[in-house]
Structures are given as C-alpha cells and as structure tokens.
Amino acid sequence: MSAEIDIESTQQMLIGLLQPWNNSLLDPPSAQNEVLQKLVTDFSKTVYGKQKGADQLDNINDFRRVFPIATYEEYRPWIKKVMSGDTGQLLCEEPAGWAITRGTTKGESKFIPMTPTDMRLRISAGRAVMNYIADHEKFEIFSGANLNLNFPSNVGTISAGEQEIEYGYSSGIYTKFVSKFTPIRSVPSQEEIDVLGGGKSIEDWERRFELAYQKCKDEHVTLVGGVLPTAQRFARYLRKAHKVYPKDIWDIQIVTLGSVPGINTRYQPSLNALYGDVVIREIYGATEGMFGQQRDAKRAWVPNYDLFFFEVETRSGIKMMYEMEPGEMGSLIVSTPIFPRYRIGDLIRAFEPPYFRCIGRDRRSTMFRYVWDEVLSLNFDQL
C-alpha cells in the first residue's frame, strides 16, 4: 500500500460519492420524485419552462402533460438561441462548456451546452471504479495513473450571432472537470491532449496515441478510461509502433469504458487479449449526460436514479424506467438539467432490478443484432 494514500479519508470520500446512488437504488420512486422536483424548479427559471407552466406542476402526470417528449431536432432552435447569447431561453445558468457529438443528426453534429450543475452530475461516471475500489478495498488503484484516451475538450469555435463559441468532445470536457474533484490522476492531462488539436484523421489519432505512450510508459498505470473503440485502436497502435500491447508494459487493474453495446460480452475477449486479465466496468452515457454505470460483476449497468429522471416508451406506453419488467425493452427518455423529456435515441433492455443494458440505437434492426451478438458471445441474455 502506498504511504501517500490516506485510507480513512479515502473511504469517507467514497461513501460520499456512492451513498446517494446506493440509497436511490433502494427506493427508486422516492429518488426519482426528488430529482423531478429539482429539475422542475430549474426548468421554471427558463423561457421554455415558463411557456410550459413549469412553476405550476405538482406531480409526474402534470410534468408529462405539459412537457412533450422531444428530440434534438425539436430542441435545436432553442439551442441556437442559447448559442447566440440568450442563455435564459433554455438554461437557468451560464454554460460551462459546449460539447459536440462524435456522430451526426441528419448530417449535422449536435451541439450540447454543459452547465456547472450538469458537469457536477457527470462525476457520477467515476462511480463504476469507485464502487469497485470500495467493495474490494483496492485503494492502491489511486496511487497509479489513469491512461487518458479521451477525445479533445477543445477542438474549435463556431460563430453564433455575435459570439464565437468554443466547443469540444464531452469526454474530454468531463475528464478535465473530474480531475479537479476526484483523486484520479489522468495522464496525459487533458490540456496536453488539447494542444494536439481536434483532427480526426489516422495521423491525428496516432499523434495522440504516441503522446499517451510517451507520457505513461514509465508510469504505474492502474486504470484505463474512455470509449471502447479508442481503447482498442490505442492497443493496436502500440503493437504496430512499439511492438508491445498495454498488458506487456502496465499492470492495469480495471478498465472503465463506454460508447458501444456489448462491452462485457461481445468485446470482453478482445479487451483481455489487449489489456490482460483486467476487471471490466461499463459506463452508459452520451454527450447529453452520464446515465448509469456498472456496479458489480453482473454485466449490466445501474441507473443514476439520484441524478436524472428516466422514462421509457415501451409497447405498453410510457412508464418509469424502474417500472420495466425483466426482458422488457423501450426507447429511453431522459430529463437532465438541460433538457426536459429528451428522447436520447437508445433502446434499453431491462433485467432483474436494478440492472439494464443499452442494446443499441432505437432502430428496428437493433434487437436482431443484439440477439445475434448474444449467441456469438455465448451469453444468451445472462448477467
């Protein structure tokens, strides 16, 4: 055990981060009602919320009645007003940053404002590794470095009215923010990644990968965080450029990854081949927020009922996420500090409470692909 780790203070820190989550899982209805009250209070301070009568709402039925389910395209005009400087149209506080999606909506990238309140909620993504450390008393993980393979937090500017808005990728913005509030030390720093720019070419990514290798090759790396495709590409770059895999130079204990379905099933053999016999923990989130993370060895994530408001559109209608039956599927609708009743575009499958999986985008073919992947991975819908 490293002498610099204060076990007692570390345990208290972990309790502070994890207890609200664990409490919400014991009583999801109460937790979700409390979240809704907080969100409605903030919505009532915006022009959008005032137009809907947010200050007159008493319950979930009222909330559903006055706030329609909306996609990004329906929010886009409001977002453009915020980007032009009229913050109060959709937000009750000034943006702390602007995130751009890696994908597109109808050919255009989505720009998502990130407020200070929203950023504080995103720290929840760290709960996956924090819970593992707390449950297994693996405090030595904090003595090492997190191999930072995230996207740049600053990639360019866009004109909006008379303003020039800086934007980046949510994973990079989140990493820069979370480094200030948790004991996790990310290497290279997000600022060092940002210096290389926001290019998307193979050469751009190889420059970032080489930076990560040079900064971490002599480090005690215990943790890897980021998105799964990037983690795979980085490992293959090391093999091509330096004739090693990550497992050959680091004793990594845990990887926390997101962005694609099947991290613990379809992609588990590949991760172990590249990174060794590591613990795998899945993060479920999007540019719009961090909505859940894996809590234990069961291969599914658990919602952040204490932070976001979750509804699902199922074949039997709109219901709360915690009301789903095992095996039931539906299109996820989230309410965040930015967006009331936002259709995220993901298809969710429920398991035994409180476990869920995102099985892919909300498309007709998704279920067929999910079943095929489960058969190939010999998982057969098991946790």
Image (spheres, grey):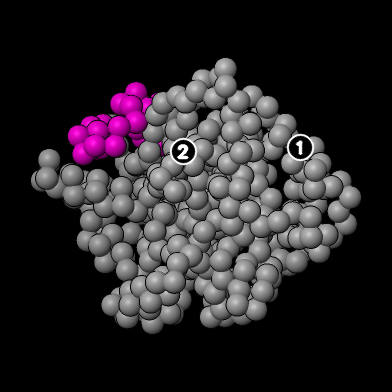
Judged from the image, the secondary structure of the residue bearing numbered disc 1 is: loop
Q: Position of residue 35 (x, y in %)?
A: 74, 53
How many residues crowd around disc 2 within 10 Å: few (fewer than 14), some, or many (20 or more)? Answer: many
Q: Quadrant of residue 271?
A: bottom left
Is residue 212 among what the camera can see?
no
Q: Is residue 224 left or right of residue 166?
A: left
Label 1 sits on what residue type?
A: Thr
**Magenta-span inclusion, residue 222:** no
Segment tinted magenta in the rendering: 185-212
Residue 194 within the magenta-colored segment of the rendering? yes
Residue 314: name its quadrant. Answer: bottom right
Residue in the picture at 18% in, 44% down: 237
The secondary structure making up most of the magenta span is helix
Q: Is residue 60 left or right of residue 112?
A: right
Above or below, comparing residue 98 to residue 308 in the picture: above
For disc 2, the marked residue is 100
Where is residue 189? Give x, y as percent.
39, 30
Residue at 79% x, 37% y: name it. 45
- In the image, which disc is placed on residue 46? 1
Can residue 345 be seen in the rendering of this structure? yes
Position of 156 relative to 31 (above/below):
above
Is 204 positioned to the left or the right of 299 in the image? left
Instruction: Report the side of 59 relative to 369 (left or right).
Output: right
Assign a secondary structure to mark 2: strand
The answer to which quarter of the image holds residue 83 is: top right
> Which label belongs to residue 320?
none
